[in-house]
């Protein structure tokens, strides 16, 4: 049974919830985030998981209502935003951009002319956003199936824009995703093959047959598919190893009986996509593919290959998730277990930093505050990582590049993070954050700390950066009022304040009318640069 995304239910016609008021869940005064800022929260953070305050279904419904409101106002802006986030790798997952572009492709714009114009634009955007069949099948599921001429034309173009070799590789790697088989998609959409090679690949997808290998030199796509079929029936490991090395056969095409052979994993490793390598580190460790010093050295080089990290567009938090999963020594469902290798963990730690673009230090005196309240542990940011953990990781990036930074954890009290945290491993920093006292959120404590450290009324800070879900209990004295006091007493009217939203909701601490506030969202590699540019006065 296919597990449905909360987005799928959200895209079905249902009543939309009442918009939030500009107060936190505890009735403390905060600022309402405008719909376009919140659209980027949906695109970057997503709204398909539960939070401390809302179920994942309600969260997704609220996101859909927001997307539809933006579509009514400016459809092109919504479509371009989805393309921008996906194309520039600004989000940990592509799912959120697919959700938004699917909503745009199915929205009723009021007239037949408008529907044709904007839906065609949405499909054009989807053609770029849906880079793999996994993405395409998700788009189809969000759209509710393959119905209508526009949807069928889009799928035909999707296949036409790929070479036979790319289609053959995708047919082997992505046979079934999100409840959709490639054979079903081809039958319903009926893309034209145009060439004999493409026709042979389509026939293979539809019924599993290939033209006979009669000794003549086959095309790349056909030779690849013949090798895939040989691997399915081979009884000796060396021919399997040889075909994998020669034809670059992906892991999905390897029969299960070979996935306990360490040599087979080592054959796949050179061509394994970076993110796939991260996902399979536990399995490779379990079967013994990382026993010898040479094999460990190979995997360490692959993990820390700067060029490979940039080419793969792997998100830094994908690596952080890999660190968290690998060190647990067990897969999510407990089907695979292993003893983590310390050298692999160290390589992953290094790769986490390599995945961030170089950030030029601002030279400013910065107060970085991480919300450690209970609600931050109930909202999942990525995988098994909660918002507090992700915020701690982002704090590490700032600490690594800024020479003058003070970091605190805050909830109903403040804890000063020691400077030596910069020399700790990621898991040690996460543990430090988890060891801090828990409690409700009082964001005003951050402003109080800025006012009183180290001399009351003489704040040394040029900027304040906060990672929070904005669900503060400060009432009636608001965060913005306390920041105004810091500026006034310290004679720093241009004190910068950056609020990083950790959860997709409609509120923020940042005053939208104050040019010295910025409300940012997400955890991509450009975010430290964005904040640095704002603090330095470039933005």
Image (cartoon, helix red, strand yellow):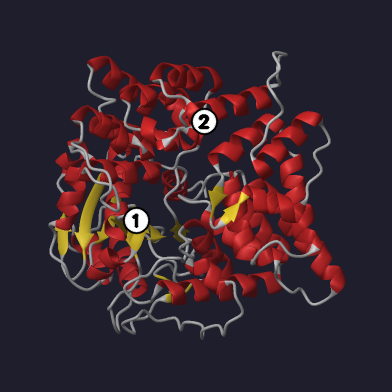
Q: For mark 1, what is the residue?
A: 465
Q: Residue 186's x, y, as percent?
A: 71, 49
What count of labels does the image hold?
2
Q: Residue 223's x, y, as percent?
A: 64, 22
Q: Residue furthest right?
A: 113
Q: CA distance from mark 2 to mark 1?
A: 30 Å
10 Å crowding of disc 1: few (<14), some (14-19), many (20+): many
**Residue at x 37% of width, y 37% of height:** 278
- Local secondary structure at mark 1: strand
**Residue at x 64% of width, y 39% of height:** 208
- Left or right of 219 in this view: 510: left
10 Å crowding of disc 2: few (<14), some (14-19), many (20+): few
Q: For residue 305, what is the image quadrant?
A: top left
Q: For residue 15, what is the image quadrant?
A: bottom right
Does any portion of residue 239 appear in the rendered image? Answer: yes
Q: For mark 2, what is the residue?
A: 311
Q: Residue 388's x, y, as percent?
A: 27, 58
Q: Nearer the viewer, residue 260 or 232?
A: 232
Image position of 379 with respect to 363: above or below: below
Image position of 254 with respect to 243: above or below: below
Q: Residue 482's x, y, as percent?
A: 30, 71
Q: Nearer the viewer, residue 511 or 337?
A: 337
In terms of sequence position, does the residue under pointer 2 or pointer 1 come before the other? 2
- Local secondary structure at mark 2: helix
Q: Nearer the viewer, residue 244 or 340?
A: 244
């Amino acid at each position: 049974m296919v597990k449905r995304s909360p987005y799928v239910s959200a895209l079905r016609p249902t009543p939309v919830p009442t918009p939030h008021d500009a107060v936190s869940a505890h009735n403390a005064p905060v600022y309402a985030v405008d719909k376009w800022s919140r659209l980027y929260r949906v695109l970057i953070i997503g709204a398909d998981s539960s939070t401390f305050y809302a179920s994942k279904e309600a969260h997704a419904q609220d996101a859909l209502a927001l997307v539809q409101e933006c579509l009514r106002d400016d459809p092109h802006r919504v479509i371009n935003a989805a393309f921008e986030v996906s194309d520039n790798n600004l989000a940990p997952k592509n799912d959120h951009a697919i959700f938004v572009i699917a909503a745009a492709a199915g929205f009723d714009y009021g007239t037949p002319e408008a529907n044709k114009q904007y839906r065609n634009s949405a499909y054009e955007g989807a053609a770029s956003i849906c880079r793999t069949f996994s993405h395409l099948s998700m788009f189809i599921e969000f759209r509710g199936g393959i119905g209508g001429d526009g949807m069928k034309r889009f799928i035909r173009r999707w296949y036409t824009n790929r070479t036979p070799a790319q289609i053959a590789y995708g047919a082997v790697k992505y046979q079934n995703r999100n409840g959709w088989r490639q054979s079903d998609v081809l039958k319903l959409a009926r893309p034209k093959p145009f060439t004999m090679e493409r026709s042979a690949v389509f026939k293979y997808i539809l019924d599993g047959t290939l033209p006979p290998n009669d000794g003549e030199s086959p095309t790349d796509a056909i030779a690849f598919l013949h090798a895939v079929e040989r691997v399915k029936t081979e009884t000796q490991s060396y021919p399997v190893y040889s075909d994998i090395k020669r034809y670059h056969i992906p892991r999905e095409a390897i029969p299960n009986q070979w996935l306990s052979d360490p040599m087979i994993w080592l054959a796949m490793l050179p061509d394994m996509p970076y993110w796939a390598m991260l996902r399979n580190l536990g399995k490779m460790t379990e079967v013994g593919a990382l026993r010898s010093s040479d094999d460990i050295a190979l995997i360490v080089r692959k993990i820390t290959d700067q060029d490979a990290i940039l080419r793969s567009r792997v998100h830094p938090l994908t690596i952080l998730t890999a660190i968290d999963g690998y060190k647990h020594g067990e897969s999510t469902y407990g089907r695979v277990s292993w003893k983590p290798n310390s050298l692999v963990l160290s390589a992953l730690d290094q790769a986490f930093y390599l995945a961030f673009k170089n950030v030029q230090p601002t030279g400013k005196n910065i107060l970085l505050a991480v919300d450690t309240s209970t609600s931050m542990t109930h909202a999942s940011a990525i995988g098994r990582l909660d918002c507090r953990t992700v915020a701690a990781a982002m704090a590490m990036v700032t600490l690594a590049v800024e020479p003058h930074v003070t970091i605190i954890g805050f909830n109903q009290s403040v804890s000063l993070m020691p400077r030596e945290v910069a020399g700790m491993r990621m898991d040690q920093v996460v543990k430090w954050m988890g060891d801090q006292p828990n409690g409700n959120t009082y964001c005003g404590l951050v402003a109080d700390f800025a006012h009183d450290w180290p001399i009351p009324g003489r704040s040394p800070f040029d900027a304040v950066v906060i990672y929070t879900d904005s669900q503060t209990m400060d009432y009636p004295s608001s965060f913005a009022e306390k920041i105004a006091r810091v500026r006034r007493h310290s004679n720093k009217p241009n004190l910068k304040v950056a609020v990083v939203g950790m959860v997709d909701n409609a509120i923020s601490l940042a005053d939208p009318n104050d040019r010295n506030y910025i409300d940012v969202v997400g955890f991509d590699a450009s975010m430290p640069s964005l904040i640095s540019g704002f603090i330095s006065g470039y933005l």
